[in-house]
Amino acid sequence: MRVLAVDTTTERGSVAVAEDGAVRGEVRLACPDGHSRRLLPAIEFLLGSLGLGPRELEGFAVTTGPGSFTGLRVGLSTVQGLALASGRPCLGMSALDVLAVRAAGAAPATVAMMDAYRGEVYGAVYDGGGQPVRPATVERPEALVAGAPERAAFVGDGAERHRALILSLRPHAVFPARSLFLAGTLARVAAAALARGEGVGPAELRPLYLREPDIRKARP
């Protein structure tokens, strides 16, 4: 199964192609001003570098959130358009779940934390194999850490930002060195899932929003 994966949940965007359990290629983009202008050129460059045409892809994957509202829309709409045009199946996966997969085996439990700004984090708790044991939330980092196991691996930009706080509450915490560019891991996981027939149509992809958008209607 040859799969193209897209992650635009944060300013660290990435696209990757995986096949037969291995990542064949990945493009990483630091996009503090958004992904809308860079995502499609990155996909075109990656496929060209691998000598692949769009019709040679057998499936698509995308991180569905949490993260930037604009980033999520860019990633989802791009994957939906590509899948619709090619008639290929899709897989959506939480960015927190991808982070947990990356840290699997580092400790008896894993806490994935993404910076949600406003003094909060997006977070979820997993067992040592990366299976969720607590639903994803948006909350103060101290609240998330207080509810985490005593011995856990903390991963994600939220874990990096709040390392001192985490260690003050969980002295036995570990911080495995993992890249925060997620498309490569997403592509490998999605390729296996799609091969098992777990894909959906592009219209069935849904964003994972843990917080209401900042945009509000103007008062009359």
Image (tube, rainbow, N blue to C red):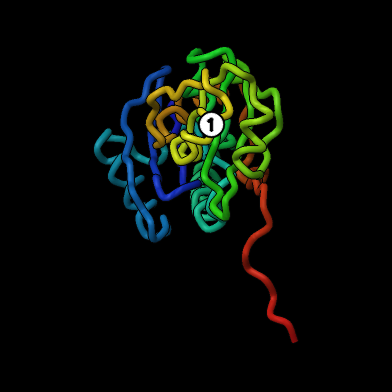
Q: Is residue 156 left or right of residue 121?
A: left
Total tally of numbered discs in the picture: 1
Q: Is residue 63 left or right of residue 179?
A: right
Q: Residue at x 54, y 26 (%)?
A: 100
List the single residue furthest toward the right.
220
The kind of residue tagged 1 is: Ile
Q: Residue at x 61, y 44 (%)?
A: 202
Q: Residue at x 31, y 40 (%)?
A: 27
As drawn, 145 above or below 79: above
Q: Residue at x 63, y 47 (%)?
A: 207
Of 112 and 26, the residue lying toward us: 112
List the single residue furthest toward the bottom.
220
Q: Residues within 10 Å of mark 1 (few under 14, many from 20)?
A: many
Can you identify the residue that label 1 sits on? Answer: 166
Return the x and y of residue 117 as percentages of the image width and height: 54, 52
Return the x and y of residue 57 as percentages of the image width and height: 43, 34
Return the x and y of residue 46 as percentages of the image width and height: 30, 40
The quadrant the C terminus occupies is bottom right
As drawn, 77 above or below 95: below
**Element type at mark 1:** helix
Of 42 and 174, the residue lying toward us: 174
Residue 126 visible here: yes
Residue 89 visible here: no
Return the x and y of residue 219 as percentages of the image width and height: 73, 82
Q: Is residue 135 left or right of residue 195?
A: right
